[in-house]
Image (spheres, rainbow, N blue to C red):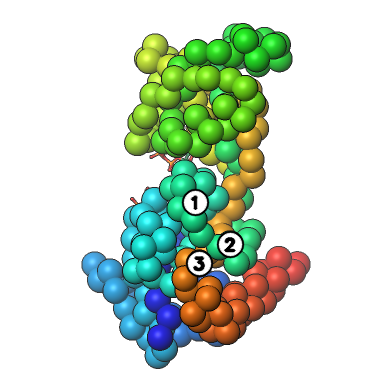
């Protein structure tokens, strides 16, 4: 039996669709109610907060999991990426008031010490450090775009999809760090102990992704 950890929230619908379109038994996920665990044939599904999926996979509570690149990178968990589903595409970007744009065009020293509000403090520290810039993170759990107007941060690091939230809060993209999309990951242990089963599931989901991409 394989255990898959699935993120609740906006990604659950896409995960369920990919499983069903890949021919995996996942019908109960269409009406999950308050249940957090489902068994269907040879599969067991766990519903978890998106940010907890990498942790469940890392600690072996699940063999596989679906997660956005944003939460996977932020978790710091050592996972094996099996597939980029192409769903939930957006980008991890630094944004701020337009007046800050000049500092982002100039030398790194102009960005030193910036206060960055974010749901992704580890990612912020790592990505800015890779660019030779030390920042101070202001950790928040949501509504990050309001932080510069409140005076508690100079800029934000968050995911941007349509840009609607940035625009509504008077912010612009200053720099894009990396693309984000929904990935299928496994633990290193599961990849060694159950490689054939993982490969079969990955291929089925990959075919479902391909069919979705076809016009
Ligand atoms: N605007 C967006 N566009 C595309 N994908 C997004 C967007 N916002 C979040 N995501 C993806 O969805 C995931 C988080 O989903 P969501 O925002 O529903 O989480 P949540 O609110 O913590 O979930 P829950 O409803 O269980 O509390 C992220 O990992 C990201 O990859
Ligand atoms: O570019 P857009 O299409 O506007 O999407 C980006 C917004 O979506 C996500 O927020 P979410 O809806 O999850 O709200 P929260 O993080 O503030 O709770 C993300 O954190 C951005 O705020």
Q: Which mark is residue 182?
A: none
- Which residue is at the far right? 215
Q: Secondary structure at mark 2?
A: strand
Residue at 55% x, 50% y is: 69
Decide which of tag 1 and tag 2 comes sooner along the chain. Answer: 1
Whether residue 29 is visible, yes or no, is no
Q: In the rendered view, would you say 117 is above or below 109?
A: below
**Label 3: which residue?**
188
Q: Are marks 1 and 2 in contact (CB under 8 Å)?
A: yes
Q: Nearer the viewer, mark 2 or mark 3?
A: 3
- In space, the residues marked 2 and 3 are separated at their CA atoms by 10 Å
**Label 1: which residue?**
72
Q: Residue 81 is drawn in which quadrant? A: bottom right
For label 3, the crowd category at 10 Å Cα-Cα, with few meaning under 14, some 14 to 19 and many 20 or more, is some
Q: Position of residue 70 (x, y in %)?
A: 51, 46
Q: Would residue 186 appear left or right of 32 to someone viewing this image?
A: right
Q: Which mark is residue 81?
A: 2
Position of the N terminus, as image quadrant, is bottom left
């Amino acid at each position: 039996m394989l255990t898959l950890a699935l993120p609740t929230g906006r990604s659950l619908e896409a995960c369920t669709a990919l499983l069903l379109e890949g021919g995996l038994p996942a019908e109960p996920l269409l009406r999950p109610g308050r249940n957090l665990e489902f068994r269907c044939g040879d599969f067991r599904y766990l519903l978890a907060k998106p940010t907890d999926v990498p942790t469940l996979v890392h600690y072996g509570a699940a063999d596989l999991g679906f997660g956005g690149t944003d939460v996977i990178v932020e978790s710091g968990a050592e996972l094996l990426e099996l597939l980029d589903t192409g769903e939930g595409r957006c980008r991890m970007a630094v944004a701020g008031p337009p007046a800050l744009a000049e500092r982002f065009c100039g030398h790194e020293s102009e960005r030193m010490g910036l206060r960055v509000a974010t749901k992704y403090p580890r990612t912020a520290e790592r990505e800015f450090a890779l660019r030779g810039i030390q920042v101070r993170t202001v950790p928040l759990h949501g509504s990050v775009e309001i932080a510069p107007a409140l005076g508690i941060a100079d800029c934000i690091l968050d995911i941007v999809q349509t840009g609607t939230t940035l625009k509504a809060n008077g912010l612009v993209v200053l720099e894009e760090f990396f693309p984000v999309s929904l990935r299928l990951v496994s633990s290193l242990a599961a990849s060694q102990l159950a490689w054939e089963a993982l490969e079969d599931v990955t291929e089925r989901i990959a075919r479902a992704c391909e069919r979705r991409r076809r016009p």
